[in-house]
Image (spheres, rainbow, N blue to C red):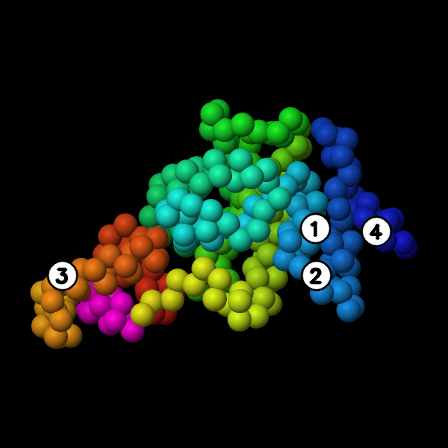
Amino acid sequence: MSHAEAFYADPQAIRADAGRRIMSRDYLMARLGKTGEDLKLSTTLKLLSDYCGAACYLLARYDLVNEQHLDSVVSSDWPFDLVRQIDAELTASYHKTNELEKCLSILQPGFAHLPADISLPDGINRQYCSVVFNTGKTRYILMFLLPEHVVPSAQRITEAGLIAAYALSLRSSPEVLADRSMELTDRELECIYWIAEGKTSDEIAVILGISRNTINNYITSVMRKTATRNRSEAIAFAVRNNLV
């Protein structure tokens, strides 16, 4: 069977509601595993976009969206103006959930509508789909914009999240490892450890021999880096990621 035939081999390849042909799983895996082909992250994400029947993709660091700037975006082929507008939407969705809900949402397909004041390209549905996943200690969100009338497959979105997580785990160059690093300093780790032990800022200040204000500054830095809103969420994040 040729690649062209394999591309359309999936029995569900034809979507009756849209009349569009969707990439088969066999063809996707053949492209991703092709011997000698070093696929770039953007190429992998474009293949996953095609596999899900999407028009375009956006991959962002989901634990940095509260900073409200484009540093959280890892890779995207969305129109730039739309990428800039989506930041507030990501921030709002992130802060609507607590730490337990964030854990339960991993690899669970999500469906939502973009606000009416966000401008979309012609032929693009206002509904988008997304999946959240972890690669190491880092949490990402992969979002897809859909053509009008396309009904996304929840299973394919989950599979896209798994493959994207694997692709990110292979990025081992020093530049990538340093990219948007949120590693905590030794002092910050000490502070979060003692907070988890139930110590107050005054008590930690005595233990570490530094001022209470400095302790509070470290704790604030921890919450900023981990995108948590209070000490309890910071402790939950630290425990979940084996930081304490």
Label 4 to label 3: alpha-carbon separation: 63 Å
> Where is residue 209 shown, x and y percent of the image?
12, 75
Label 4 to label 2: alpha-carbon separation: 19 Å
Res 213 label: 3
Q: Nearer the viewer, residue 199 or 76?
A: 76
Name the residue located 22 percent from the left edge and 68 percent from the top edge: 191
Q: Are marks 2 and 1 in contact (CB under 8 Å)?
A: yes
Of mark 2 and mark 1, the one earlier in the sequence is: 2
Q: Quadrant of residue 197?
A: bottom left
The magenta segment = 186-198
> Where is residue 205 shown, x and y percent of the image?
12, 69
Label 2 environment density (alpha carbons within 10 Å; few <14, some 14–19, many ≥20): some
Q: Is residue 129 visible?
A: no
Could you tell me the amino acid type at mark 1?
A: Leu
Furthest-right residue in this view: 1
Name the residue located 38 percent from the left edge and 66 percent from the top edge: 183
Q: Is residue 99 above or below residue 117?
A: below
Q: Which residue matches tag 2?
A: 39
Q: Is residue 223 visible?
A: yes
Of mark 4 and mark 3, the one earlier in the sequence is: 4
Label 3 to label 1: alpha-carbon separation: 50 Å
Of mark 3 and mark 2, the one earlier in the sequence is: 2
Location of the C terminus by quadrant is: bottom left
Comparing marks 4 and 2, which lies closer to the viewer?
2
Q: Which residue matches tag 4?
A: 6
Q: Which element is circle 2 on?
A: loop
**Please, what is the dominant secondary structure of the magenta stretch?**
helix
Q: Which element is circle 4 on?
A: helix
Comparing marks 3 and 1, which lies closer to the viewer?
3
In magenta segment, residue 191: yes
Of mark 3 and mark 1, the one earlier in the sequence is: 1
